[in-house]
Image (cartoon, grey):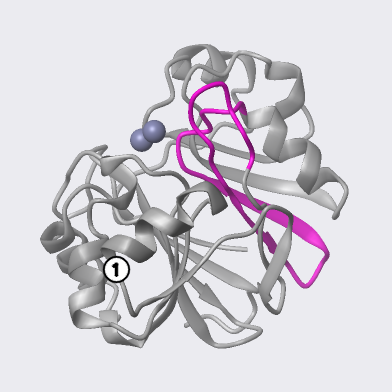
Amino acid sequence: MNMDSSFEINIVFDDKCPKPGFLPGFGFSVLIYNHFTENFSLFDTGGNGNILIHNIEQFNVNTSAIKNVIISHNHHDHAGGLDKILQINPNIEIYVPIAHVKSYLRRYSGYKVHGFSELKEIEKNFMISGEIKGNFISEQAVFLKTIHDELIILVGCSHPGVEQFILIAQKLGNIKAIIGGFHGFRKLSYLENIDFIGACHCTQHLKLIKETFPDQFKRICLGDNYLF
Ligand SMILES: [Zn+2]
Ligand SMILES: [Zn+2]
């Protein structure tokens, strides 16, 4: 682990450009290491738990050592690997959009399920946006604050609109990077001042984003590791 960085971001579930040894699958998941707390967290769980755990192990991380799992929204390609994670790690803290807390508690009775309606820091420099309501689907994002007070945003599909998460994060500091699915997002002016635009997974207008921001756009591959 690199000690000059605040966070390590490891892409553990996606179907794009897999690095050797990684198994592709439809969905999204990011393994985060927080240098402030020395904890591992998982943002989303992809669509298949066995594939997810295989890919986590490629980073020499044991699933039982992960402290938190954050589910961005209740779609199978983001929440499908959770069952398997809980079998191995029943003590993990589970954060879901608040509208789904009751249904998750019904399904996972006795497990530690949480949901927030507003921004919440769950551990040092590690925040959850709280539930953002969309037209059909509510969703939450993760905001990581580096030692330089810059924000890293992790998004699932961004069904309520990427700008909703950017507007909240802007209040906390300069946005350095955003990584995840941008679904049908086209309001590109919101991305202008972001150095690292890691649109991936379900992003429909990927080509347009890449062509508009050729220097800022980063191609995200399964097995990638980024330090911030
Ligand atoms: Zn998705
Ligand atoms: Zn989705």
Question: In the picture shown, does residue 88 fall above or below 213?
Answer: below
Most common secondary structure along the magenta stretch: loop
Q: Is residue 142 magenta?
A: yes
Kindly identify the residue that appears in the image at 38 percent across and 28 percent down: 202
Identify which residue is drawn at 64% across, 39% down: 132
Check residue 146 for magenta coloring.
Answer: yes
From the top left corner, tell me how far across and down residue 13 is, in percent: 28, 51
Residue 106 screen position, x and y as percent: 32, 62
Instruction: Work out whether residue 115 or residue 103 is closer to the camera in this orientation and state it.
Output: 103
Q: Nearer the viewer, residue 105 or 119?
A: 105
**Residue in the picture at 26% in, 69% down:** 56
Q: Amino acid at mark 1?
A: Tyr
Locate residue 25, reporting x and y percent.
17, 43
Query: In the displayed structure, does residue 119 sit left or right of residue 137?
Result: right
- Compared with 153, 5 (above or below) is below
Image region (quadrant) for ligand 1: top left
- Mark 1 — residue? 108
The stretch of residues the image draws in magenta is 132-161
Up/down of 175 relative to 227, above or below: above
